[in-house]
Amino acid sequence: MKFGLRFFLSWITSSALMFGLFYLWHGIFLNDFKRIQFPLTWFVAFAACTYLIFGAATYVLYESFLLKKIRNFFTRGVFCGLIMGFTFFMIATVLNISLTKHLSMKHLMIDCIWQITEQIVGALVIVIFKVTIHDHSMEQI
């Protein structure tokens, strides 16, 4: 895996888009931010850092040996998003069990679907940059 222009542009763009979708879902649509019991700026800063990690992890998974067996870029991106979305949903649910104890199974499933969708969108951004940005180092090989 090379850390060139393709990596940095797809990582930052994917992270920013996933963070924007997160903010839209939890901040505007569900209005979950009202329940935060510490300063909102801290939460937004922590969430932004978390989504930078999500974006990097998505890129690493997309470029992993296991997923490289999937030749179709689009299919690999969707599969990568599915894996990342479900994994992050499980982690968030376990860490926030005190916040989710009163939620119905329907709400948890909708949240799971949203998380998977969010991660698929992020992975597809990586696919777009993977396809559109030409890697000059491959020409030398």
Image (cartoon, grey):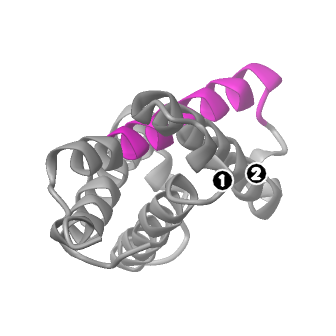
Q: Residue 135 appears in which quarter of the rendering?
A: bottom left
Identify the magenta region: 103-124
Of circles 2 and 1, which is in front?
Answer: 1
- Tell me the residue at 76%/46% (across/down): 100
Depth check: 125 or 116 in front? Answer: 125
| Residue at mark 1 | 88
Please, which residue is most extreme toward the top here?
106
- Residue 21: percent from left, percent from top: 35, 42
Whether residue 64 is in magenta: the answer is: no
Q: Which mark is residue 93?
A: 2
Q: Is residue 96 above or below residue 49?
A: above
User: How many discs mark residues in the rendered view?
Assistant: 2
For disc 2, the neighbor class at 10 Å (few under 14, some 14 to 19, many from 20) is: some
- Tell me the residue at 15%/45% (across/down): 132
Give the left or right position of residue 55, taking residue 8 as reference: right
Q: What residue type is disc 2 on? A: Thr
Q: Is residue 28 above or below residue 109?
A: below
- Tell me the residue at 45%/44% (across/down): 26
What quarter of the picture does the N terminus occupy? bottom left
Q: Is residue 40 above or below residue 74?
A: below
Helix, strand or loop at label 1? It is: helix
- Residue 94: percent from left, percent from top: 82, 57
- Residue 14: percent from left, percent from top: 31, 54
Whether residue 123 is in magenta: the answer is: yes
Helix, strand or loop at label 2? It is: helix
Q: What residue type is disc 1 on? A: Phe
Depth check: 32 or 11 in front? Answer: 11
